[in-house]
Image (cartoon, helix red, strand yellow):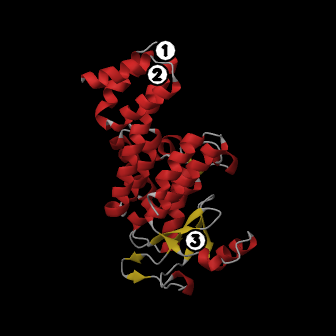
Amino acid sequence: MSDNLQSLIKLLIIEDDPKIIEHVSNELVKKGHGIIDTLQTVADTHNQVAVSDIIEDIIHRIHCRQLHTDLKHWATFRDDDLLEGLLLVASFQYPFLEVSIVKERLAELQRCATDDVLPTCATTKAISILSNNIYERFEYKVAPEQDCSHDVRLYYINDMLTRRKTSPTLMAAIYYLCATQLNIPTWFIDTPDALTLGFGQRVVKRKVEKTYQPKQNNGIKIDCYLNIDKGTIEAVKSFQNQLEESGIYDYLEALIPVDNKRVIQRLLEELAQIYKNSRNRVRYRELRHLATVLN
């Protein structure tokens, strides 16, 4: 430990003045990831809870600075990798997340969810089998709206794969990762009420399905949509009618597909809202700031 770092930590421990503590904390945050192990050791061994809490907050702030950088890099160069984006979101709450374990669990879900789909299955048949495996066989489910408004665990992929309970946005993301393995053209549809999925024709052996071409989707062929709460298929017209009934006047605008960056941004925005509901303004501002990286 350098003399400067040792002096700052010592000052942090003995000082009572809030202004000095804030100044020292800011100086420690500037030192970045290289000091996290030292700070964590102090937090784990110190007998004053208040001091440990301050140090844990400093560690979190350092992680947030790094996450800001990582998200910006992902959005610029790697946004085609949705899983990486989901793992970055999870690192907000779980900075020491075992990524390999999460990837193994996801790979197992993908394998089990898709192993009954034959190469010759049409889109609707493939989706039906996929939904049955995810929602029924393995009992993954979307949490009630009330839970989604206060439980942050519903927005982290590692928690979702462990608890098999999640938010609509994260369920759509996981479903997408499975559906694309089956060669089903799949798009995220970002309606004001919830993120869901639209599906196009599946290229199958010796057969290409006929497809309906809705003009509002910039040439993208969407044959059906997913009811994200139930895992059931919604016809194009039925889905449009639901949007109209829910008060979304310009539903054609709502049906324009969005990219992975918008999916991750929406996940961050929803998380921020939960912290706002619980009056945790610090976490709310952190997440809103992270979300702006993806604009």
- Looking at marks 2 and 3 on the same chain, the residue that comes earlier in the sequence is marked by 2
| Quadrant assignment for the N terminus | top left
Front-most of residues 173 and 190? 190
Question: What's the residue type where badge 2 is placed?
Answer: Ser
The residue that label 3 is drawn on is 225
Question: What's the residue type where badge 3 is placed?
Answer: Tyr
* SS category of the residue bearing label 1: loop
Disc 2 + disc 3, Cβ < 8 Å: no
Q: Position of residue 188 (x, y in %)?
A: 51, 67
Disc 1 + disc 2, Cβ < 8 Å: yes
Residue 179 position (above or below residue 89): below
**Crowdedness near tag 1: few (<14), some (14–19) or many (≥20) residues, C-alpha within 10 Å:** few
Number of numbered discs: 3
The residue that label 2 is drawn on is 52
Question: Going by the picture, which residue comes out furthest to the left?
Answer: 2
How far, Cα to Cα, is label 2 from label 3?
A: 49 Å
Residue at 69 percent of width and 72 percent of height: 243
Q: Position of residue 18 (x, y in %)?
A: 52, 26
Residue 211 position (above or below residue 228): below
Residue 164 position (above or below residue 53): below
Question: What's the residue type where badge 1 is placed?
Answer: Gln
* SS category of the residue bearing label 2: helix
Q: Position of residue 241 (x, y in %)?
A: 70, 76
In-image side of 4 versus 49 (left or right): left
> Which image quadrant is residue 236 in?
bottom right
The residue that label 1 is drawn on is 48
Front-most of residues 45 and 195? 45
**Crowdedness near tag 2: few (<14), some (14–19) or many (≥20) residues, C-alpha within 10 Å:** many
> Which image quadrant is residue 250 in?
bottom right
**Crowdedness near tag 3: few (<14), some (14–19) or many (≥20) residues, C-alpha within 10 Å:** many
